[in-house]
Amino acid sequence: MATISVATPSGPYVVECARGVLRRAGELVAALGPATAVALVSSPRVWKFWGAAVRRQFARARAKPPATVLIPDGETAKTLTTMEKLCRGLASAGLDRRGIVVAVGGGVVGDVAGFAAATYLRGIRLIHIPTTLVAQVDSAIGGKTGVNLPEGKNLVGAFYQPALVVADPEVLTTLPGRHFRAGLHEVIKYAILGDRHLFEFLENRMAELVRRDRAALDWVLPRCIGAKAQIVSRDEREGGPREALNLGHTFGHALESLTGYRRFLHGEAVGWGLIAAARLAARLHWLVADDAARIEALVGSVGALPAVPRFAPARWIAAMRGDKKTRGGRLRFILPRQIGEVRTAENVPEAALRRVLAGLAGAA
């Protein structure tokens, strides 16, 4: 399918995106140079499906067998406690500064393992083998790592680029349907923020994607990865263009936090966030009503989302103030101006925001 380059000031790397590329993972990592030890970091449920295949790759490539460290992969486990457990596992495995951490899993495993690699011994090499759609098109690329606090999502972390990303669409075959559909909302995000052609493709072929049609998926994956790679190469640390990738996330992160990270998968919360962003943009007359309706219809075509609990708008707003994009206590939103273009909005009238939030309450 594709070898996609990511060129950041911290260093260049590639995303190898191809069917069957997992069977070359050991070879690809060996090509990066010698390592004293490898730690394979995953979750129990991912390891059940893919652990043997991954372990074989690294056992063949090395005289010393790789260590395996398993951590929980639910959003509730994305904590400093899990981070400590992982770092102690790396120490027990004997990793030194020439060791490699290989993250095998979805966004939570990747974020925690990435944060551990960034901080253990002040930084060791990191490889991502993403096993969810969200991770393949988004979280495994770009170097964002971190964990949550009770006060908000991803408030503790680091920008730390991997040395390699190995994205194999074949591993998505074991992904539960709900998790796969949740990932499609991140795909929709890319279409709204900068790719009208992708948006039209999704409008016409979403049913095929939901069924995991091979041809449709093989077209979408490298397109989204390429978009993320271009944005991250221009703005590694989210000081400008990279903020566009937060479309839907200010609302979505607040929704996850308000529900204790138990009701919504991340992609589902982003789905609601895309709807909220479109409605707010329309209310502010940034976005024409027809485009707002198309965005909402496309999100709906993925399948029903879990209903939004009836939170008072004041609780929503308080949760959003804990978002890392807030500046000086002022909320900032990424909102669509048209399909294929977004802008940052500050000083949004609170009355307009409250109406949008009230309209989400109880929705399904």
Image (spheres, rainbow, N blue to C red):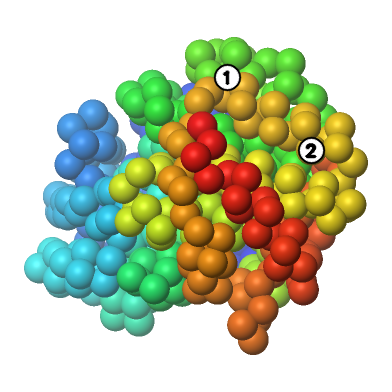
Q: Residues within 10 Å of mark 2 (few under 14, many from 20)?
A: many
Amino acid on which the number 1 mark rests in the picture = Leu
Q: Say which residue appears at 66% left-offset and 36% top-offset.
A: 188
- Counting from the top left corner in percent of width and height, residue 360 is at 58, 44
Q: Which mark is residue 209?
A: 1
Q: Residues within 10 Å of mark 1 (few under 14, many from 20)?
A: some
Quadrant of res 213 = top right
Measured in 3D between alpha carbons, the distance from the residue under mark 1 to the one under mark 2, in whole angstroms, is 22 Å
Q: Is residue 287 above or below residue 132?
A: below
- Counting from the top left corner in percent of width and height, residue 142 is at 57, 59
Q: Say which residue appears at 39% left-offset and 37% top-offset.
A: 131
The tag earlier along the polypeptide, 1 or 2, is: 1
Tell whether 40 sits left or right of 208: left
Question: Which mark is in front, 1 or 2?
Answer: 2
Amino acid on which the number 2 mark rests in the picture = Ala
- The residue at which mark 2 appears reads as 292
Residues 134 and 162: in front is 134
Q: Is residue 305 above or below residue 334?
A: above
Q: Secondary structure at mark 1?
A: helix
Tell whether 96 sits left or right of 4: left
Quadrant of res 116 = bottom left
Task: Tell me, yes or no, if residue 324 can be seen here.
Answer: no
- Counting from the top left corner in percent of width and height, residue 191 is at 73, 38
Tell whether 322 sits left or right of 99: right
> The N terminus lies in which quarter of the figure?
top right
